[in-house]
Image (cartoon, rainbow, N blue to C red):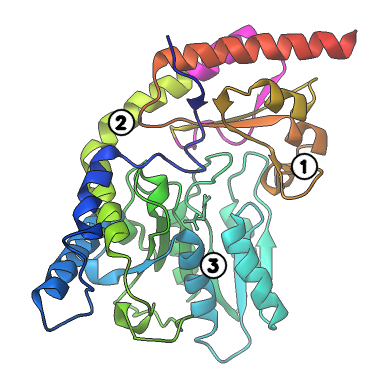
């Protein structure tokens, strides 16, 4: 027996691991100090906890603990990276990015465009991967920053980060990656990939919401970032404001758990994901995978269903939490900008579904979903032909 509803939307957010919740508890009660209080034990205790979390997060990202700046999440980290970089240069500047980035990258770029910065948005190939040569063509002498996400939040494709950072550096351009969907799910090392700026967030790795980090390279070269908040000068002056200690502690412990369990967990989830796809594609015709299947997060499946109405599909899957290829930002659902960039028609983009499998999904749940989707799609197709 499976318990309903089934959660398969782990790219949207992950449940907070109960072990993480336990690690946070004391910091709401007895250990309530402010890490900026330098003259008493309450402050020192909080400071030690934040320092520990900084080390835990830095190990997951593969950087030095001193390179971690705690933020409120990946949206803030991306804003700090992109605006902070561009506002620290005083010459005409350009950013190069990709049309399939998350809005937390695209919107700060658009905002900078309003302020006179030039932005080039490169379209990926049909499989969602960027063509490194196309990126190279877009780099001009005034380019300051190249920003390309590690793993796409909708189609899960994994961009060639090492190649892109090498390309950026060969043109004296800084390289930022929004690694929100990759860190904690697949091995990642900022140092090995030679990345200058990395954004991540806690709530995608079974930690609490409202906390994240930006990893900023300290040496060779030291990256100049203009802070967005003025205030008490916390986080080396880069992010003023009293630190959210319980959330930071939880984020740190969530990172440590991912480090310890990633290899086994990822293999298990990949087996479930492959079982899901085999079961669905064996029982139904007209399913089309969106994005490269080979270079993809093991937790992700995104496909379109030909011959059905997208809204009816989602409404019919009422006891399975997943995402559609439509963003409900208006009364009329908008087709996903990622799927349109891959060349899908609006109709097919809206009739797409994204599964994000996670820590507690089981094979029984996957079997339930296979049967549910199969029956629903058959019924919808019969109805549309009647
Ligand atoms: C790729 C990517 N970047 C940024 C974000 C925003 O993260 P946060 O919710 O921590 O601001 C998300 C969350 O959906 C994401 O998937």
Q: Circle 2 sits in a helix, a strand or a loop, which is it?
A: helix
In the image, residue 291 lies in the stretch drawn in magenta = yes
Instruction: Mark 3 or mark 2: name the one nearer the start of the chain.
Output: 3
Q: In the rendered image, which quarter contains the C terminus?
A: top right
In the rendered image of this protein, does residue 90 appear above or below residue 175?
A: below
Q: Could you tell me if residue 139 is visible in this image?
A: no
Residue at which label 1 appears? 333
Compared with 15, 24 (above or below) is below
Kindly state the secondary structure of the residue where label 1 is placed: loop
- Give how far apart the Cα atoms at labels 3 and 1 are: 31 Å
Disc 3 beta carbon < 8 A from ligand 1? no
| Left or right: where 14 falls relative to 278 | left
Q: Which residue of the protein is positioned furthest toward the bottom in this rendering?
A: 90
Residue placed furthest toward the front: 29
Q: Nearer the viewer, mark 1 or mark 2?
A: 1
Query: Residue 302, image x and y in percent?
Result: 59, 31
For residue 363, say whether it is visible. yes
Name the residue tied to disc 2: 265
- Most distant residue in the left direction: 41
Q: Position of residue 364 (x, y in %)?
A: 42, 12
């Amino acid at each position: 027996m499976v318990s309903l509803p089934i959660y398969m939307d782990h790219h949207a957010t992950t449940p907070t691991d109960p072990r993480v919740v336990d690690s946070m508890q004391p910091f709401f009660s007895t250990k309530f100090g402010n890490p900026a209080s330098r003259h008493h034990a309450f402050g020192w205790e909080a400071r030690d906890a934040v320092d520990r979390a900084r080390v835990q997060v830095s190990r997951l990202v593969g950087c030095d603990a001193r390179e971690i700046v705690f933020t409120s999440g990946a949206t803030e980290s991306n804003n700090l990276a992109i605006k902070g970089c561009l506002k620290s240069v005083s010459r005409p500047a350009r950013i190069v990015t990709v049309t399939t980035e998350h809005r937390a990258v695209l919107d700060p770029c658009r905002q900078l465009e309003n302020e006179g910065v030039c932005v080039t948005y490169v379209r990926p190939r049909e499989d969602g991967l960027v063509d490194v040569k196309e990126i190279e063509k877009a780099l001009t002498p005034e380019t300051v920053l190249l920003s390309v996400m590690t793993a796409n939040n909708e189609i899960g494709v994994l961009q060639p980060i090492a190649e892109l950072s090498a390309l950026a550096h060969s043109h004296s351009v800084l390289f930022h990656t929004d690694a929100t969907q990759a860190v904690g799910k697949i091995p990642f090392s900022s140092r090995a990939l030679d990345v200058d700026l990395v954004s991540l967030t806690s709530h995608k790795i079974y930690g609490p919401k409202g906390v994240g980090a930006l990893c900023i390279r300290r040496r060779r070269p030291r990256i100049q970032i203009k802070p967005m908040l003025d205030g008490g000068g916390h986080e080396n002056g880069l992010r003023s404001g009293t630190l959210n200690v319980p959330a930071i502690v939880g984020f740190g412990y969530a990172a440590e758990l991912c480090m310890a369990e990633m290899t086994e967990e990822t293999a298990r989830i990949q087996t479930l994901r492959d079982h899901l796809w085999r079961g669905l594609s064996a029982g139904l015709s007209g399913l089309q995978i969106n994005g490269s299947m080979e270079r993809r997060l093991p937790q992700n499946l995104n496909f379109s269903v030909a011959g059905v109405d997208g809204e009816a599909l989602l409404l019919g899957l009422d006891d399975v939490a997943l995402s559609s290829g439509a963003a409900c930002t208006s009364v009329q659902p908008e087709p996903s900008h990622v799927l349109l960039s891959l060349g899908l028609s609006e109709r097919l983009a809206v009739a797409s579904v994204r599964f994000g499998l996670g820590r507690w999904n089981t094979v029984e749940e996957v079997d339930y979903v296979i049967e549910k989707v199969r029956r629903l799609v058959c019924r919808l197709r019969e109805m549309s032909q009647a």
